[in-house]
Image (tube, rainbow, N blue to C red):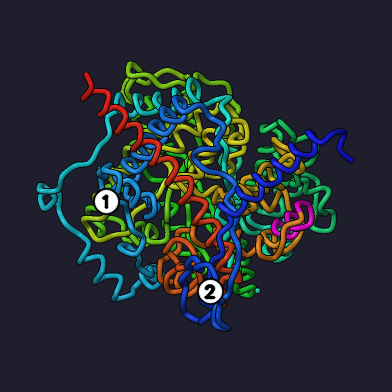
Amino acid sequence: MFGSKNDFKKWAQMRNETRKHLRGITRTYIRSATEGTRNTREQPPGQVSTQEEEAFHRIGLLGIHTTGVPLEDLLQCASLLVKALQLRHHYMGLSMQSFPETLVAYLNRHGNVPFHRPFDIRDASRNFNDNLILGNTDADRFMQLAGCSSEDLVGCEPQHLDLPVHVTNVRGIYVLVINHLVGRNLVLSLSVFRKVDTHIHAASSMNQKHLLRFIKRTLRTYPEEVVTLVNGQPKTLRSVFEDMQLDAYDLNVDILDVHADRNTFQRFDKFNAKYNPVGESRLREVFLKTDNYMNGKYFAKIIKEVISDLEDNKYTYIEPRISIYCKNKEEWSKLATWAVRHKVYSNHVRWVVQVPRLYDIYRITNLLKSFQEFLDNLFEPLFEVTLHPASDIELHKFLMHVIGFDSVDDESKPENPNLNENMKTPEQWVHEENPPYNYYLYYMFANMVQLNNLRKEQGLNTFVLRPHCGEAGPMCHLNGGFLLAENISHGLMLRKVPVLQYMYFLAQIYIAMSPLSNNSLFLRYHRNPCPEFFARGLRVTLSTDDPLQFHYTKEPLMEEYSIAAQAWRMSSCDMCELARNSVLMSGFPYEMKQFWLGAECMRDGPQGNDITRTNVPDVRLSFRHETLLDELDNLFKVKTRMHATSSTFAASR
C-alpha cells in the first residue's frame, strides 16, 4: 500500500494531526427537550444527557485563522463591511424601517453607537381593517385624534439626508465592492403553514383561466353596459367586442394570449404587451384598470374574486402592487375612492403602491414639466392627508392598508448609473432623459423619511421601501437597495457580486424571489440562484410576481413552492422555512405574525420559533442564527484587532 516506511510515517503523522484537530473543533451540545424551553449549552466531558435533553455534535470548519485571506486584506475588508452595516443602520433609522436586533447589539457592543433607534414593528402595529369601513365611529374618532395643524408640529425635529452625503455613501459602497473585495477568497460559512406572497402585481393576480371566465361571464351578463368613450361617443361592452369581431363563444385561452412564452425572454416590451388581453389595450383599460370610464368596476370585481379564493384557502396571504403613475395629484384620491367604495380589503391583503419609472414618457408628452412635479404628484397628497385627514377621509382610510412603496420598470434599460454631487436637482431636471434608477430611489427615500416622521408624530402607520432591485441592469442598483430599502424583490444580480451577497447576508435583508417569472424574462430556471442563496443563509422567500403571465393553477403561490421543491430537491423543512421568511418579511400587523408564528416570532434564533406553528425545527434556526453570529464575531474581532494594532503603533511612535 505504501511505497516506503517514510510514506507510511507521513501518512500516520497526517492522520494523527487530523484526529487531533477534529478533537479540538468537535463539541457536544445539549438542548433541552422540555416544551417551552429553548436553551442550548455545551456538554462537559463525561456528562451523560438525560431523557429531557437532546445531545448533538457540531464540527467547526471555518474560523478567523482559516479564511484563506491575507491578514492585511482581512483587516481592511472587515473595517469596510462594518462601515457598510453602520450606514444601513443609519438609513433604516432615518426612514423608520426595520433593522435586525442582533446587528444592533454588535454595533453597540463594539463601540459603534447607532445614529438612530431602529424601527420596531411592535411599536407601530395596528389592525386597520375596521377603520376602512365607511361610517365606522372608531374610524371617525381615530381620524380626529390623528389630525393636527402644521403649527402643532413646529417642535418636531426634521429628518433629512442630503444628496451629496448619499452620493458619498453610495460611492463608498461601490469602492468596497470594486477595489477591495472583488476576486478575494472571502469564505461564507453559511449553510398546512401560513405563507405570504410578498411580490405580486394586482393587475395580474389572477390566472389566465380566471380572467377568461370573468370576461366571458361579464360579456354575457352586461353586454349593453357603457364601458368606454371612443371619439367622444359611448361604447358598450358588446360593441367593443364587435369591433374586434369576437363574441363570448369565440374567446379561449389561446386567443386571450396573456401568458408569457419564449418570445418574451430578454424582451421586456413583449412581456408588457401580455397585459393586453387579445392584444388590445382597450380590454386592459376596461378590465384591469382602476381609473377608467367605469371607475374600475370590473377590476374591483375580479380582485374581490381573487380575495375570496384566498379567504377560502385560509393559509395564503398577498401583498399586491397597485400603481400610482404620478401624472397628476388626483390619482391618489381616485385610487382610494376605488378601494374604499368597492371594498377591496381583507385580512388576507395588504397593499403596496408601485411607482413606474416613466418620467421620460410624461415629459415627452408634456404631461409634466420637471421631475419635481413627478415627486409632488406622488407625495404631496400624502403629506396633506396626514396633516388633515378630514380633507380626504377615503385616502386616509386606504393608507391604513398600504404598507410601502415599490419602484418598478425594466432595469435593463440603458442609463448612466452613477450618481454624483453635481447632478441636477428635481426642479432642474426638465429635459426628456429619464433619471437613473438610484436617482428615483434616493428621492423616494428622502420624501418617505419626512412622511414617516410626520405620520409617526400623528400616531399613524409608516411605510417601507421595497423596490424591484437586481432583476437585471448594473450592480449599482443593489448598492442603492442595500442602503435605502428594507427589503427588495428579485435580487438576481447578487449572484455576480459575491461581496454584495455577503453584505445582504450580514444585514439579513429579505429578498422576494420569483423563479418562474425570471425563467420567462431574464434567467432560466436551472440557473436561478435562489437555492444557493437559501443554502448560504440569505433571507429569501418565494413569490409569484405575475400569475396571469407565469402560472396555470388557482393557487399560484403553491405552484411556485411545488416546482421549487421538485426542481431543487428541497425538503419540507426548507419549504416551511421559506414560508416563515415570507411572513416575517411581510407588512402584516405584529399581532397577526404572533398568531401565525408564535408570541416571540420577532426574536432571533430558536428563541423566536414555535415549531407547532411554523413546522421549522429549532435546530435549523439555531444553525442559521449561530452561523450569522460566527460571521459577525469574526468580522468585529478583526476590526477590534485592527484598532488595537493601530493604537499600539501610534503609542510606539
Amino acid carrying mark 2 in the image? Gln
**Depth order, front residue of 406/635:** 635
Residue stretch rendered in magenta on the structure: 559-568
As rendered, which of 229 and 364 lies closer to the eye? Answer: 364
Q: Where is residue 556 in the image (x, y as percent from the top left)?
A: 69, 59
| Magenta stretch holds residue 107 | no
453, 81: nearer the viewer: 81
User: Is 627 placed left or right of 529 in the picture?
Assistant: left
Badge 1 is on which residue? 117
Q: Which mark is nearer the camera, 1 or 2?
A: 2
Q: Measured along the vertical axis of the image, is residue 562 above or below residue 77?
A: below
Query: Is residue 68 in sight in this rendering?
Result: yes
- Dominant secondary structure (helix, strand or loop) of the stretch shown in magenta: helix
Q: Quadrant of the N terminus?
A: top right
Report whether 597 appears left or right of 112.
right
Residue 374 seen in the current view: no
Residue 238: x, y in percent? 72, 54
Q: Which residue is disc 2 drawn over?
A: 47
272 or 290, nearer to the observer: 272
